[in-house]
Image (spheres, helix red, strand yellow):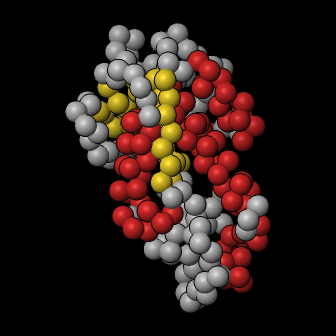
Amino acid sequence: MLQHFSLNKIICGVDEAGRGCIAGPVVAAAVILPTHFAHTFLNDSKLLSELQRKELRPIIEKNAIAFGVGIVDNYKIDEVNILQATYLAMHQAIENIQHKIDLLIIDGNRFKPYKNLSHQTIIKGDGKYIEIAAASVLAKTYRDEIMENMHTKFPIYQWQKNKGYPTVAHRAAIKEFGACAYHRHTFRLLKEEQLKLF
């Protein structure tokens, strides 16, 4: 059962989606929830079905005191590396929150401090605290939407299904057709073969 991190501080949960992908952006979300907020099946977004995540997104957005989303594209990821790009996306998401924050709680064990805000990293925090779980749902649904839109330009990669993760089918398509402009070219797209580019 998820809990609120604190009932007497303004807590902002932060999480990201897409770090392990080989195509598309990394997306982060930051969420401040009222202390009375609860939902029956809100959990770590990876444990929810796509339908549940899509159902939760408008509920979170409507009930949140504030929320922000940050998006860093594959070009920037290739330029600065995925860890730095993740920090950038998280910082963008926090920047988009126009509300006082007492403490940032971030899923995982690494974070680059943002301005003078206090923060705490929490391993598997999206399965422990409702603020991070809500951020994980927003980050995942926003990113999925981006990948579904990108799929219409490059349907051969089946991004509507794999969302840019290195599935067998995704890698088979790269092997057959080459990589496109939305792939992360500093990542290992294929294990051996030389890539041809569009």
Query: In the visual, does 88 lie left or right of 174?
Result: left
Q: Position of residue 113 (x, y in %)?
A: 26, 41
Residue at 68 percent across and 47 percent down: it is 145
Please tell me which residue lies in front, 157 or 62: 62
| Residue 140 visible to an observer of this rendering | yes
Please state, as top left, top right, bottom left or bottom right, where the N terminus lies in the image. Answer: top right
Q: Looking at the picture, how far across and down is residue 90, in whole percent? A: 41, 43
Q: Is residue 123 above or below residue 31?
A: below
Q: Residue 139, percent across and down? A: 55, 41
Residue appearing at x 40%, y 11% in the figure: 7
The quarter in which the C terminus is drawn is bottom right
In the picture, measured across the screen, residue 132 lies left or right of residue 23, that is: left
Residue reaching furthest bottom? 194
Q: Is residue 33 above or below residue 119?
A: above
Query: Is residue 7 positioned above or below 26 on the image?
Result: above
Judge whether 88 appears above or below 22 on screen. Answer: above
Relative to residue 92, is residue 158 drawn left or right?
A: right
In this rendering, the count of numbered labels is: 0
Kindly identify the residue that appears in the image at 35 percent across and 30 percent down.
104
Is residue 162 shown to the viewer in this render?
A: no
Left or right: residue 150 compared with residue 124 = right
Q: Quadrant of residue 25?
A: bottom right
Q: From the top left corner, tell me how far across and down residue 32 is, in percent.
A: 46, 23
At horizontal 73% and vertical 65% (from top left) the residue drawn is 153
